Amino acid sequence: MRIIKEGEFLARVRQGISLGDCWVKTKNGIYPSFNKDITFEVKINYFESSIVHMNVCACSIFTSNNNSFNFMAPTSMIKEETDSATVPAGGDPIYAKNFWGKIEKIGEDGERGNDSYLVKGEVAKKVKAATKAGNLYTDDLSESKNVMHIPTGEKLEGVKKSFDDTLSSQREYGGHSNYGDTSVTHWDEGEAAIAFTDQFGNKGAMASLTMFIVNGVNIMPDNAANLEMWWHVHPKTTVNGIKLGNSNPSDADFDAQKLMIEKGYKGNTFVIGTRDEKVTFFNKDGVLITVKWSDFLRMGGQK
């Protein structure tokens, strides 16, 4: 059971809503079961998002005779009247995860272009506040721990190709793009996954990819300030009884991001898991956010 955190949401439940077999906690601690229709007002505590995705909600009922009591009820009983703001049209989409992990569009940036953003934390709060006020969000959306850039157009198609190539070959693929590029540059495929046994006798498996190798030539930049993004894909394969292909960044992945930052790169990076079909964004310090591959594609399509 999930308890919604405090907020300022008010929903009114109309007459004719059945409580079914809902257990109710009254003032004197008795837990009777209801199976009748009543008219009442429900005050719901919530966290940032609509409750429609909630399985159970915590409510306080105020009846016509001024009695009040709390109950736990399925949200199917509740008819909402929300004051949720409509996202103003006029720019590139900005998305965020809601309380239940669903990706939703929360605003636009005021610039009609080819950008798409995934935000969290303080930035998400500011975007929602702007949208609620009927405004576009015009503050800085440079990549940071709270802002992730989603590839769109031909660049998204390039990322999709690397996913498909990894899925079919069971080898790592990846690539990059520079500012001003209209498409991505794909790297040469990685080596086949191998089995190993560590010094303590533990069995393991690993897949690997050498960054920035294109047609056998190393094009790793000495100065990565013009690098817009880089990514790679983990293959769905089984070696030594170990299943690979999740989107969890490895120690080597974090080391690679640290190297790029040392070379002047200013963005985040992401790894795609072909087994769990998720995308994890991370920086040199740790994981930032994980989303479904399907949501990643939807955001990249600006939908």
Image (cartoon, rainbow, N blue to C red):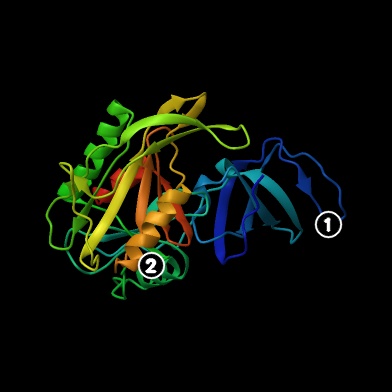
| Above-or-below relation of 92 to 272 | below
Q: Which mark is residue 58?
A: none
Q: Amino acid at mark 1?
A: Lys
Q: Secondary structure at mark 2?
A: loop
| Above-or-below relation of 135 to 251 | below
Total residue callouts: 2
Q: Secondary structure at mark 1?
A: loop
N-terminal label among 2 and 1:
1
Residue 98 location (% of width, % of height): 47, 54
| Above-or-below relation of 48 to 215 | below
| Left or right of 303 on screen, residue 274 | right
Q: Amino acid at mark 2?
A: Ser
Pick the front one: 37 or 148: 148
Residue 86 visible? The answer is no
Answer few, some or many: residues within 10 Å of disc 2's Cα (few below 14, many 20 plus, some between 14 and 19): some
Pick the front one: 131 or 295: 295
Residue 68 location (% of width, % of height): 75, 58
Q: Which residue is mark 2?
A: 144
Q: Residue at x 51, y 46 (%)?
A: 53
Pick the front one: 190 or 108: 190
Give the farthest residue toward the front: 199
Q: Nearer the viewer, mark 2 or mark 1?
A: 2
> How far apart, in angstroms, are the residues tagged by discs 2 and 1?
48 Å
| Left or right of 164 on screen, residue 194 | right
| Left or right of 8 on screen, residue 66 | right
Q: Which mark is residue 27?
A: 1
CB within 8 Å, label 2 to label 1: no
| Above-or-below relation of 148 to 79 | below
